[in-house]
């Protein structure tokens, strides 16, 4: 097949594409979708995403453990009451409830009530260590919740930006299609006037077909990103990201201040440090097994039966007990060794997390600077490409430029517009990543 046949086939394909694109748009036209702002998306995601819900549950559990460890200083209190009927056939028997001899062929009914209490006076400093571990665990849970919210905020923000960027790229592709359509009209007009060759119109149709294919791909990407946004915020179908000019403001970041703040206040670092403190307190609690325990208990009770007309007699007792586990076959040593290993792991995790935070922050700050410069460069490129296309199109009308020059300039403008969108959102994503690391908005 010759070059002319190929161009003719491309022409026919290009002529069929507009109808095909229109047909796809008609058959897949989406229903009206909900529009959400970034703030609403973050709020809804926190209410529905398992990561945040799990972190909230961990905080509730940790707070309950703090209450339980504090209550170890309070006494145990119990109350019991019972009634019984004892019947003896044959010879006399001893009533086990009242310790009375019941003649044969008779019955005895009794009532018993008892109130008892006990309290640990000394536990070898175990209770204080348990409270310290519980508090540190609670602090770690709170910090982990903050970190989970910021990580979820980062994920939601990126998903939101994906949907927003996809819609802006769709607008770029639509503009590219319009430019290709206008150029095709010009090429056909010049061909009819005899000032251009058939190759010009064929090339213009191929360019239009390529632009229409890119438009279809942009529509597919938009549908995918909006469906992902809907899932992230707990919705079904598609959700549109609301455009907001305030999202694009460029901030000045003090790298030294951000590094210092991240090292001290980052939620992930705070959670790791709290976990280390919890491991230290758990080790102290394990070592308390070498100390004796001292407990105080007391009880009072009332009992009566039918032989005394259910007159209740009171009995009381009080006891002070000391227990000291001198040897338990090295169970204490095993528990201490386990807690020491856990402490070593917690310290290593905290140190590694600090280094990882520093490494990640270094890369993100560099990415932020590069993206900020990329925005300016991309905008200059769009301005230059727009002017270049205007000049080349005018030269083409005058016959001083070829169709190849025009199509090349069109492609350069389309790519510059795509690069501008990418640069803008690269900056926003880098900023969002730094905010997640630091634990606050920049």
Image (cartoon, helix red, strand yellow):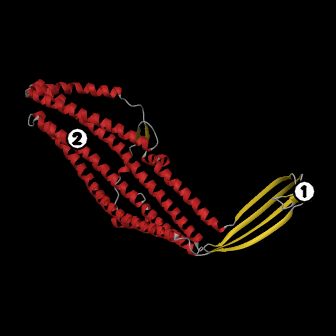
Locate residue 134, reporting x and y percent.
55, 64
Determine which quarter of the picture holds residue 348: bottom left
- Disc 2 residue crowd, few under 14, some 14–19, many 20+, Cα 10 Å: many
Is the C terminus in the top left, top right, bottom left or bottom right quadrant?
bottom left
Q: Which mark is residue 116?
A: none
Q: Residue at x 36, y 55 (%)?
A: 433
Locate residue 181, reporting x and y percent.
22, 30
Task: Report whether 283 appears left or right of 104.
Answer: left
Locate residue 357, reporting x and y percent.
36, 62
- Disc 1 residue crowd, few under 14, some 14–19, many 20+, Cα 10 Å: some
Nearer to the camera, 126 or 81:
81
Q: Is residue 58 above or below residue 407?
A: below
Task: Report whether 379 appears left or right of 276.
Answer: left
Task: Report whether 258 appears left or right of 113.
Answer: left
Q: Is residue 392 visible?
A: yes
Mark 1 or mark 2, which is nearer to you?
1
Q: For mark 1, give the secondary structure.
A: loop
Q: Which mark is residue 414?
A: 2
């Amino acid at each position: 097949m010759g070059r002319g046949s190929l161009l003719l086939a491309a022409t026919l394909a290009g002529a069929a594409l507009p109808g095909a694109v229109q047909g796809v748009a008609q058959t897949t036209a989406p229903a009206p979708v909900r529009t959400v702002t970034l703030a609403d998306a973050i709020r809804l995601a926190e209410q529905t995403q398992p990561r945040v819900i799990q972190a909230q549950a961990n905080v509730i559990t940790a707070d309950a453990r703090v209450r339980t460890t504090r209550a170890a200083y309070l006494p145990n209190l119990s109350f019991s009451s019972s009634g019984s009927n004892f019947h003896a056939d044959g010879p006399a028997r001893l009533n086990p409830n009242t310790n009375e001899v019941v003649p044969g062929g008779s019955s005895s009914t009794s009532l018993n009530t008892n109130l008892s209490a006990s309290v640990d006076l000394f536990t070898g400093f175990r209770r204080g260590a348990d409270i310290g571990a519980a508090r540190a665990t609670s602090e770690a849970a709170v910090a982990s919740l903050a970190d989970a919210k910021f990580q979820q905020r980062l994920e939601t923000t990126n998903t939101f930006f994906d949907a927003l960027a996809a819609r802006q790229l769709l607008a770029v592709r639509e503009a590219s299609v319009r430019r290709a359509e206008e150029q095709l009209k010009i090429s056909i007009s010049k061909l009819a006037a005899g000032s251009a060759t058939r190759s010009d119109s064929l090339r213009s149709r191929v360019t239009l077909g390529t632009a229409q294919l890119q438009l279809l791909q942009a529509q597919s990407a938009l549908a995918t990103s909006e469906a992902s946004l809907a899932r992230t915020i707990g919705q079904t179908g598609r959700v549109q990201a609301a455009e907001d000019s305030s999202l694009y403001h460029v901030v000045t970041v003090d790298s030294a201040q951000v590094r210092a703040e991240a090292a001290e206040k980052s939620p992930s670092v705070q959670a790791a440090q709290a976990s280390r403190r919890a491991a230290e307190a758990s080790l102290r609690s394990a070592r308390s097994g070498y100390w004796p325990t001292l407990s105080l208990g007391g009880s009072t009770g009332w009992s009566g039966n039918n032989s005394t007309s259910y007159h209740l007699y009171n009995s009381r007792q009080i006891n002070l007990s000391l227990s000291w586990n001198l040897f338990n076959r090295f169970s204490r040593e095993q528990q201490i060794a386990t807690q020491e290993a856990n402490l070593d792991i917690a310290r290593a995790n905290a140190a590694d997390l600090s280094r990882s935070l520093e490494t990640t922050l270094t890369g993100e700050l560099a990415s932020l600077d590069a993206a900020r410069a990329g925005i300016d460069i991309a905008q200059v490129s769009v301005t230059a490409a727009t002017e270049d296309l205007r000049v080349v199109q005018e030269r083409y009308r005058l016959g001083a430029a070829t169709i190849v020059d025009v199509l090349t300039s069109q492609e350069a403008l389309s790519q510059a517009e795509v690069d501008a969108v990418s640069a803008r959102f690269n900056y926003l994503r880098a900023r969002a990543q730094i905010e997640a690391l630091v634990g606050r908005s920049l």
